[in-house]
Image (spheres, rainbow, N blue to C red):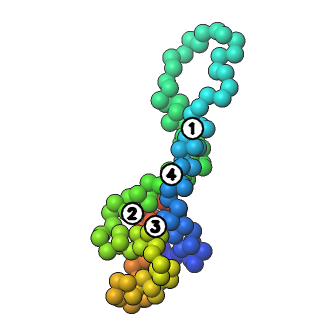
C-alpha cells in the first residue's frame, strides 16, 4: 500500500491545479535545451562523423532532470484526466480548475455532489494515489 503524507497530497494537488503552468515551463525548458546558443563549428572544419540530430535532441532531453520531471508531471496529469470517469473528472474541474464560489473546501464539494465529506476524500485519495504512480512520485 502506498503511503502518501499530507505534504505529498498538497504537492500532488498543486501539480493538478497548475498543470498549464507546468506545460509552459516544459516548453521553455525544451527550447532552452534544443536551441543552439553557442556555435558548434568554431574552427570551420568538417566533421568526419555522420550527424544524428534526433538522437542528440533525445539525449539532451532525457539527460536533463528538470525536463524529465516536468514531462512526467504533465503526462501524468493528462493521463489521469483522460482515464478519469465522469464523476472524477467533474470533481477535478470543480476543485482545481473551475472553482465556483463556495467550492474551496471539501465539505462544499461534498454538498455539491450530494455525498459525505469522507466519500469525497476517499475519491480524492484514490485519484492522488493514481497520479503518484503515473508520475513516479512514489
Label 4: which secondary element = helix
CA gap, disc 1 and disc 2: 26 Å
In the rendered structure, are the residues bearing label 2 and label 3 in contact, judged by CB atoms less than 8 Å apart? no
Residue 21 position in % (x across, y down): 54, 55
Residue 68 at least partly seen:
no
Residue at 50%, 56% (x, y): give it: 20
In the rendered view, tell whether residue 1 sits above or below residue 41. below
Q: Position of residue 137 (x, y in %)?
A: 52, 63
In the rendered image, is residue 87 in sight? yes
What is the secondary structure assignment of the residue under circle 3?
helix
Decide which of tag 2 and tag 4 comes sooner along the chain. 4
Q: Which residue bears the numbered disc 4? A: 23
In the depicted structure, whether residue 13 falls above or below residue 60: below
Give the CA distance from mark 4 to mark 1: 13 Å
Disc 1 on helix, strand or loop? Answer: helix
- Residue underneath mark 2: 80
Q: Residue furthest front?
A: 101
Dot placed on the residue nearer the N-terminal end, 3 or 4 = 4
Label 1 – label 3 distance at C-alpha:
27 Å
Up-down relation of residue 78 to residue 37 (above or below): below
At 50% from the left and 66% from the top, the residue drawn is 17
Q: Which residue is mark 3?
A: 97
Where residue 85 sits, quadrant-wise, is: bottom left
Say which of marks 3 and 4 sits in front.
3
Kindly report the distance in space between the C-alpha atoms of the residues bearing marks 3 and 4: 15 Å
Amino acid at each position: 500500500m502506498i503511503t502518501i503524507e499530507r505534504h505529498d497530497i498538497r504537492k500532488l494537488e498543486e501539480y493538478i491545479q497548475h498543470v498549464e503552468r507546468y506545460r509552459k515551463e516544459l516548453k521553455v525548458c525544451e527550447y532552452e535545451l534544443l536551441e543552439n546558443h553557442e556555435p558548434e563549428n568554431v574552427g570551420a572544419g568538417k566533421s568526419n562523423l555522420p550527424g544524428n540530430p534526433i538522437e542528440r535532441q533525445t539525449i539532451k532531453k532525457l539527460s536533463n532532470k528538470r525536463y524529465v520531471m516536468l514531462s512526467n508531471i504533465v503526462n501524468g496529469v493528462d493521463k489521469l484526466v483522460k482515464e478519469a470517469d465522469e464523476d472524477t473528472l467533474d470533481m477535478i474541474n470543480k476543485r482545481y480548475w473551475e472553482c465556483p464560489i463556495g467550492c474551496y473546501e471539501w465539505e462544499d464539494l461534498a454538498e455539491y455532489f450530494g455525498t459525505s465529506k469522507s466519500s469525497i476524500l476517499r475519491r480524492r485519495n484514490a485519484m492522488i494515489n493514481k497520479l503518484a504512480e503515473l508520475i513516479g512520485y512514489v
